Image (cartoon, grey):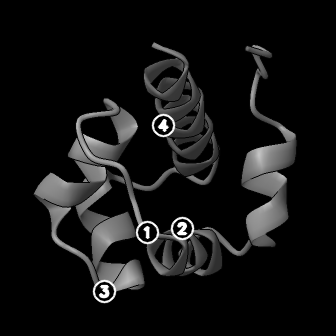
Amino acid sequence: MQEEKDLLALGREIRRHRNAKGLSQEKLAELAGLNRNYIGFVERAERSPRVTTIFRIARALDLHPGELIREMKWAPG
């Protein structure tokens, strides 16, 4: 399903930026005001984050939210 592929791409992008900044899932969760388990769920595409959650994650990564989307490996339907 396309939605699943999109969520996987978003999760990979979040993980890539998190790792590039040397952050653990726990630290990213703390900075974003989220649960560590939830960060893992999003990175593995087991949860579909709300837009406001993407904003929180982006801020914690010191990114504009559009960067997470723009840099995704996009697989058109």
Q: Residue 29: percent from the left, percent from the top?
A: 30, 70
Spatial CA distance of label 4 from label 3 is 18 Å
Where the N terminus falls, by quadrant? top left
- Determine which quarter of the picture holds residue 71: top right
Label 3 and label 1: CA atoms lie apart by 14 Å
Relative to residue 13, is residue 75 depicted above or below?
Answer: above
Give the label, 3 or 1, closer to the camera.
1
Q: Amino acid at mark 2?
A: Ile
User: In front: mark 1 or mark 4?
Assistant: 1
Residue ID at (73%, 51%): 68
Crowding around mark 2 (Cα neighbors within 10 Å: few <14, some 14 to 19, many 20+) is many
Mark 3 residue type: Gly
Give the CA separation, mark 1 to mark 2: 6 Å
Which structural element holds mark 4?
A: helix
Above or below, 30 relative to 38: below
Q: Which residue is mark 4?
A: 11
Q: CA distance from mark 4 to mark 2?
A: 10 Å
Q: Earlier in the sequence, mark 2 or mark 3?
A: 3
> What is the quadrant of the C terminus in the image?
top right
| Residue topped by disc 1 | 50
What's the residue at 58%, 29% (across, down)? 6
Give the distance between the C-alpha atoms of the residues marked 1 and 4, in whole angstroms. 13 Å
SS label for mark 2? helix
Q: Amino acid at mark 4?
A: Gly
Labels 2, 3: front one: 2
Marks 2 & 3, CB-CB < 8 Å contact: no
Q: Which residue is mark 3?
A: 33
Q: Identify the residue under disc 2.
A: 54
Residue 18 coordinates in the image, percent (x, y): 53, 49
Asked whether, in this view, residue 12 is left or right of residue 26, the answer is: right
What's the amino acid at mark 1? Arg
Nearest to the eye among marks 4 and 3: give it: 4
